[in-house]
Image (tube, rainbow, N blue to C red):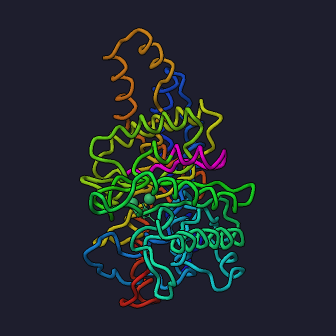
């Protein structure tokens, strides 16, 4: 299904004046601090976040999946779903594919559907954490880190295959996340596992076209519960440096032990020009993949505060590839993604509102109280009217979730696709 543009314009028609009036107040308040609200609205309108193909089904748990009905059964339908979110928000103009879940049968047809929905192909994701039914080698005891040369080679070849598919689609980057590690002490030799991983990544890096980037994702534990070979940002950073200048670290918000200072990791990586990719989600305990901003919105703001600072100051750091890596098994996946996009935009807008000159002065004066006040002044601002203004500017709807429900999109998808389909994914 596809939304028609008149439906969307009608939905906004009586909201424009209201939004403008709300923003007039913010304009006056923040111009006193030399913060341009209109420049912020433009930045919000330009912001795009990739949707992972695996978040379109009701997944998100290792223990059971409960179909939501109307789930996409093919790559074509996944792109259509992202097209719907993008039409409503104008913030989701990219997809991140996962191979082998999303192998295109007809590349040109897939490209046409993406183009028609305003979607570009962001980072490609390889999968060496599951054995496929036709696999000739196993990843049971590791993939790129494996002591078994045949398994390692198999995993390297898979990544090269993913690059080839990505090239045909117009993608420019590869994300590697490895489950490789050990469940019990003594199971693997840490040094050999790390050396193997480095060699494998170098091999994959050398197979990438010159304009491609490699993103190396880290995670402290799961599915291995004793050790993970790429366990933290330092290991990822080290491997990225070993590969070359187009290899970067990817930060996934859920891939940290409790209370890790993620904003400081972001600052460090950006200073060194090595923050390449970013996966948004939220968590209470581990890699929970909950809706962005649902648990720790202040944390998300503090992280965005560093991202904004880095984007303004670290010209050696590439513009990060943003992606939502969240999905849940009890929510309508499209509503979940709309909520995540909303939370991302809110945190980004609040971070853009930080009075950076005043913060610098307060930091130089060691005025700790004022430093905190300045950050919280931005965080406590209701920025939702700025996001609405950005949406009006880019022909999205001011309230995507309300529109999604008003247009009864899930009901239409269930009518078209049925209730029994389960989308591929985590
Ligand atoms: C596993 C994971 C990771 C990757 C995705 C493909 O933790 O969620 O975050 O990005 O699988
Ligand atoms: Mn991730
Ligand atoms: Mn994860």
* Image quadrant in which the C terminus is located: bottom left
Question: Residue 120 in the image: x percent, y percent?
Answer: 64, 64
**Residue at 28% from the left image edge and 41% from the top image edge:** 259
Q: Which residues are magenta?
A: 237-253
| Residue at screen point 61% across, 39% down | 317
- Dividing the picture into quadrants, the one containing residue 37 is top right
Q: 56 or 149, which lies in front?
A: 149
Quarter of the image holding residue 413?
bottom left
Of 112 and 39, which appears nearest the observer?
Answer: 112
Give yes or no for residue 252 being in the magenta stretch: yes
- Height in image: 255 above or below 274? below
Residue sitting nearer the eye, 386 or 105: 105
Q: Is residue 362 visible?
A: yes
Percent x, y of residue 51:
51, 64
What residue appears at the point 65 percent right and 34 percent down from the top-left corner?
Answer: 315
Residue 10 makes an appearance in the image: no
Q: Quadrant holding ligand 2?
A: bottom left
Q: Is residue 332 magenta?
A: no
């Amino acid at each position: 299904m596809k939304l028609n543009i008149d439906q969307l314009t009608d939905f906004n028609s009586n909201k424009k004046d209201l939004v403008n009036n709300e923003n007039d107040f913010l304009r006056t308040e923040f111009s006193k601090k030399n913060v341009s609200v209109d420049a912020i609205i433009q930045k919000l309108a330009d912001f795009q976040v990739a949707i992972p193909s695996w978040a379109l089904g009701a997944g998100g748990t290792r223990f059971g999946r409960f179909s939501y009905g109307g789930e996409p059964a093919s790559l074509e339908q996944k792109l259509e779903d992202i097209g719907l979110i993008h039409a409503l928000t104008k913030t989701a103009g990219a997809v991140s594919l996962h191979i082998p879940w999303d192998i295109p049968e007809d590349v040109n047809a897939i490209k046409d559907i993406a183009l028609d929905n305003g979607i570009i192909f962001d980072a490609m994701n390889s999968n060496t954490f599951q054995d496929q039914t036709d696999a000739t080698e196993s990843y049971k005891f590791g993939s790129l880190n494996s002591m078994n040369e045949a398994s390692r080679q198999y995993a390297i070849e898979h990544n090269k295959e993913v690059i080839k598919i990505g090239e045909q689609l117009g993608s420019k980057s590869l994300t590697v996340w490895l489950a490789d590690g050990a469940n019990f002490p003594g199971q693997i030799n840490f040094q050999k596992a790390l050396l193997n991983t480095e060699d494998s990544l170098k091999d994959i890096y050398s197979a990438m076209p010159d304009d491609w980037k490699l993103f190396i994702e880290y995670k402290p534990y799961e599915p291995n519960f004793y050790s993970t070979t790429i366990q933290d940002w330092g290991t990822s950073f080290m491997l990225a440096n070993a590969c070359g200048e187009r290899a970067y670290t990817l930060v996934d918000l859920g891939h940290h032990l409790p209370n890790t200072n993620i904003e400081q990791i972001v600052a460090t990586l950006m200073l060194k020009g090595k923050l390449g990719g970013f996966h948004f989600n939220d968590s209470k305990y581990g890699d929970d993949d909950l809706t962005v901003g649902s648990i720790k919105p202040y944390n998300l703001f503090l992280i965005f505060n560093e991202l904004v600072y880095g984007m303004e100051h670290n010209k050696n750091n590439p513009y990060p590839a943003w992606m939502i890596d969240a999905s849940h098994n009890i929510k309508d996946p499209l509503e979940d993604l709309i909520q995540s996009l909303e939370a991302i935009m809110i945190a980004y807008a609040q971070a853009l509102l930080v009075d950076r000159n005043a913060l610098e002065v307060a930091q130089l004066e060691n005025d700790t109280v004022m430093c905190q006040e300045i950050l919280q002044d931005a965080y406590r601002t209701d920025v939702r009217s700025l996001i609405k203004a950005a949406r009006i500017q880019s022909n999205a709807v001011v309230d995507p979730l309300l529109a999604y429900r008003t247009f009864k999109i899930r009901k239409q998808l269930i009518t078209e696709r049925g209730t029994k389909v389960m989308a591929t994914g985590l």
